[in-house]
Image (cartoon, helix red, strand yellow):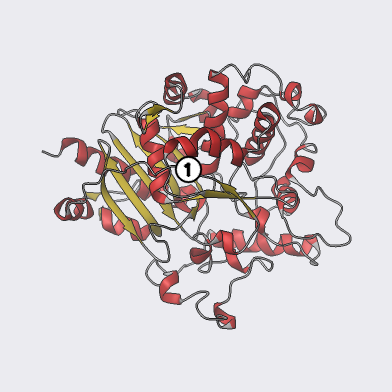
Amino acid sequence: MVCNILSVLPRFSFKRIMPQRIILFFVMTFSSALFADFPDAKESDPALLQWMVGSPPPADKTIRFEDGSYFTFPAMRWSVSNFRQLMPTVNVSRGLGQASPLSTYLNGTLSEEINALIFTPLNADTPVTWEESLHLNYTDGILVMHQGEVVYERYFGVLQPEGQHGAMSVTKTFTGTLAAMLVAEGVLDPTLRVADYVPELASSAFGSATVRQLMDMTTGIRFSEDYSDPNAEVWAHAAAGNPLPKPADYEGARSYYEFLQTVQSEGNHGDTFHYRTANTDALGWVLARVTGENVASLLSNRIWKKLGAEQDAYMSVDSIGTPFAGGGLNLGLRDLARFGEMIRNHGYYHGRQIIPVEVVADIRSGGDKEKFAKAGYSLLEGWSYRNMWWVTHNEHGAFMARGVHGQALYIDPTAEVVIARFASHPVAANAANDPVSIPAYGAVSNYLMNRP
């Protein structure tokens, strides 16, 4: 599976450092990450290691945004639960109303039964338990709902129930869902070209793509996310989105909007699924132009306030305050579960229809399997992508949101199960945790569905 770490790259500092030097540093860092022998989840526990404890913390326990130390392992296990302390953000308000009730059935016996569930990871011979799987995937928090009730909830490291965690590319799913809502309402026409909504993108590769091709990531754009290549477009996007001051000799784009205008064509629109974060940023620009609200404001007004979220969420921003639509969302675990339960219930939650029924039906129907297959995801055979959701097309009709380092929202309509997870796996690519995660989700869904 292609490793997409753009959701964290824009935060790395280019301040007073030659761009090529910092790029080569991270090329070596991320390339070596695929082969490194990392400390396990217990050894790298951020609470145990006492990152950022003290007034001030000791020098060897201090994490900074500007030097990139905040996203080196194992320090990043603290950072993912504390991004707002380190970088500029914009609020996603929950409003002033009461939080919607989250029904719970936290039965100790049931939790023990779930912990003891045994399954075999993909391409493996040795079975593991559910509880072991949480440590294998460096879980920071996980919540399981069945038939509308919370039946399992655990937190690890420094994440607390009242805390917020980086959602990484799960952010894309929120952006895609907002777009699908506007399509259903007739506000956004998916057949129109991107340039029809954002003329500034007319000369870029995005200009001739349709909005639907953005939403399903079938655009033909030149956007390499090969982190071993210092000339890959992913690094230019990273530099553009970084909110810190640039070096005096920096000549690249200085915001997400500026970068998107430089993206060139590669291949034909509509031919193949290509998971590229720049698509979501471009879609965010379309949404802002159509509604007059940026993605953070739109998410607040159209979903968060209506959902009855417990907490405000927040999004990281570039130097001019543009929310990172492709990976900047941070939110509470229970609120992620609320969103998932609302989707499971066909867009209905907290006494109101928040998302049109036809939007959820469109998501669940999935995208083009043949176009998805061309992307070569060996662990996701038979899957598809629609409205920035990943659709399994398995016997339960499960679908999910996915983010690097192990962020996930898994919905199994047949088993009536929702699983929300935050994690801080040392390897960004989902291919590192999918062999354990995917069968784990299936195992707990089957168990809950068939439990007497």
> Residue at coordinates 38% horizontally, 33% vertically from top-left?
342
Neighbourhood count class around disc 1 (C-alpha, 10 Å): few under 14, some 14–19, many 20 upward? many
Q: Which of 402 and 196 is in front in this view?
A: 196
User: Does residue 232 appear left or right of residue 74 in this picture?
Assistant: right
> Residue at coordinates 25% horizontally, 35% vertically from top-left?
147
Expressed as whole percent of the image width and height from the top left, the position of residue 111 reads: 20, 53
Image height of 375 relative to 358, above or below: below
Res. 137 in view? no
Hey, which residue is sitting farthest left in the picture? 452
Q: Nearer the viewer, residue 309 or 436?
A: 309
Q: Nearer the viewer, residue 446 or 220?
A: 446
Image height of 61 relative to 275, above or below: below
> Residue at coordinates 41% horizontally, 75% vertically from top-left?
48
Q: Nearer the viewer, residue 142 or 55?
A: 55
Q: Quadrant of residue 233?
A: top right
Amino acid type of the residue that numbered disc 1 sits on in the rendered structure: Arg
Q: How many marks?
A: 1
Image height of 21 relative to 412, above or below: below
User: Does residue 334 appear left or right of residue 8 in this picture?
Assistant: left
Expressed as whole percent of the image width and height from the top left, the position of residue 74 reads: 50, 68
Q: Which image quadrant: the C terminus?
A: top left
